[in-house]
Amino acid sequence: MNLTPAILENIWVRLEPMSDTHRESLRPLAGDPDIWSLMTLRGDGEHFDAWFDLMLDTQATGTQISHVIYRKTTGEMVGHSAYLVISPPNQRAEIGWTWYAASARGTEVNPASKLALLGRLFECGAERAELKTHGLNKRSQAAMLRMGAQHEGTLRRQMRTWRGDLRDTAWFSILKDEWPGVKAGLEARLSAAS
């Protein structure tokens, strides 16, 4: 697997590898505390720069590729998503740190972004895509199931959040041979939304 930073694009969204030039444009979007309520780290207000720097630092190690997401119909920046825990020897990576501005939630942005991210991941030789979320994040879990990801289980009290509590983490995956069906489903959803 050879997953490297690249601009990912389809007719709905454009995902650009994140750089420091995106910092001030992304800052106001991250200011919504609802985004961070079920995250392990906080990135709103005074916490934004530490979160942003962590995204860039892990990107520099080659274990993560962060993206800022633009909605193509308006040209506006609407969120963030990343490849995490990139493991070339095991031909897998996680897609996570996904969040959107309120104006983009429940729209074509998430399925279009997942279409771009998953497509690139499998084109680069992945055998497995991983996704995980807070056990309380039922909206995210429903989106993963609707997309065609398989729920693999929930790890109880697996990770500490920024509030100090231990969260249950729900794990999902998509395998390479499942990707054609997932892709067709995402494309059908997007076509119906157009």
Image (cartoon, rainbow, N blue to C red):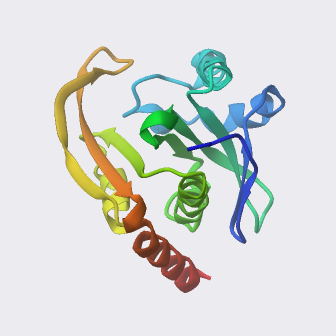
Q: In the drawing, does residue 167 fall left or right of residue 53?
A: left
Which residue in the rendered view is the most extreme toward the bottom?
A: 192
> Which residue corresponds to the image point at 28% horizontal and 23% vertical from the top-left?
159
Task: Classify 86 as above or below 187.
Answer: above
State the residue lying farthest toward the front: 89
- Above or below, 84 against 100 in this view is above
Residue at x 28% of width, y 51% of height: 138
In the image, residue 126 above or below residue 178? above
The image position of residue 33, as x and y in percent, is 50, 32
Side of 152 relative to 117 (left or right)? left
Identified at 56% across, 77% down, the residue is 190
Q: Name the quadrant of the N terminus.
A: top right
Say which of 17 and 32 sits in front: 17
Q: How far across and how far down the image is residue 48, in percent?
A: 62, 22
Quadrant in which residue 116 is drawn: bottom right
Q: Quadrant of residue 22?
A: top right
Residue 16 locus on image (x, y percent): 75, 46
Task: Examine the rendering and report whether any part of residue 147 can be seen.
Answer: no
Q: Position of residue 64 (x, y in %)?
A: 58, 31
Camera sees residue 69: yes
Q: The C terminus is located in which quarter?
A: bottom right
Seen at 71% across and 40% down, the residue is 5
**Which of the 4 image quarters holds residue 65?**
top right
Give the number of callouts.
0
